[in-house]
Amino acid sequence: MSDQARSIQRQLIKNRAILLTILRTRKRCLVKREALIRAGFYFEVYSHINRSGGRVKTYCLDVGYKNRGGGCVEIGLSGEGLGIFK
């Protein structure tokens, strides 16, 4: 694996950890975009994007987020019916 690929992988794992730390035991929550950035979150690093129903959902592995306007981001787990994207 190249150094660049390792760097991206590390940031992806860090992004996921930040989202999970904010979620804790909740299925979903709203957070200010600025708070994520201050925590070290990079919106440019993600595993995949899902565009359906006119909404864009971005994922860091199994944790997703979507912009809610007003500088807020909704965070939630994907799969098993627990997601924010139902």
Image (cartoon, rainbow, N blue to C red):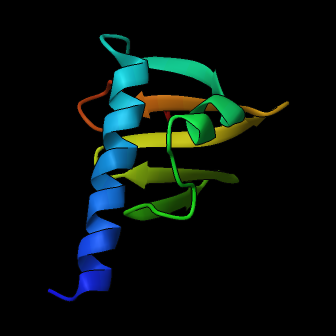
Who is closer to the viewer here, 77 or 42?
42
Q: Residue at x 51, y 53 (%)?
A: 58
Q: Residue at x 56, y 64 (%)?
A: 44
Quarter of the figure with the N terminus: bottom left
Quadrant in which residue 30 is drawn: top right
Q: Is residue 84 visible?
A: no
The answer to whether residue 5 is left or right of residue 32 is left
Who is closer to the viewer here, 8 or 25?
8
The answer to whether residue 11 is left or right of residue 31 is left
Q: Residue at x 33, y 28 (%)?
A: 20
Q: Residue at x 50, y 35 (%)?
A: 85
Above or below, 59 against 4 in this view is above
Q: Position of residue 51 (x, y in %)?
A: 57, 60
Above or below, 61 against 36 in this view is below
Above or below, 58 against 2 in this view is above
Q: How many marks?
A: 0
State the residue lying farthest toward the top. 25
State the residue lying farthest toward the left. 1
Quadrant in which residue 78 is drawn: top left
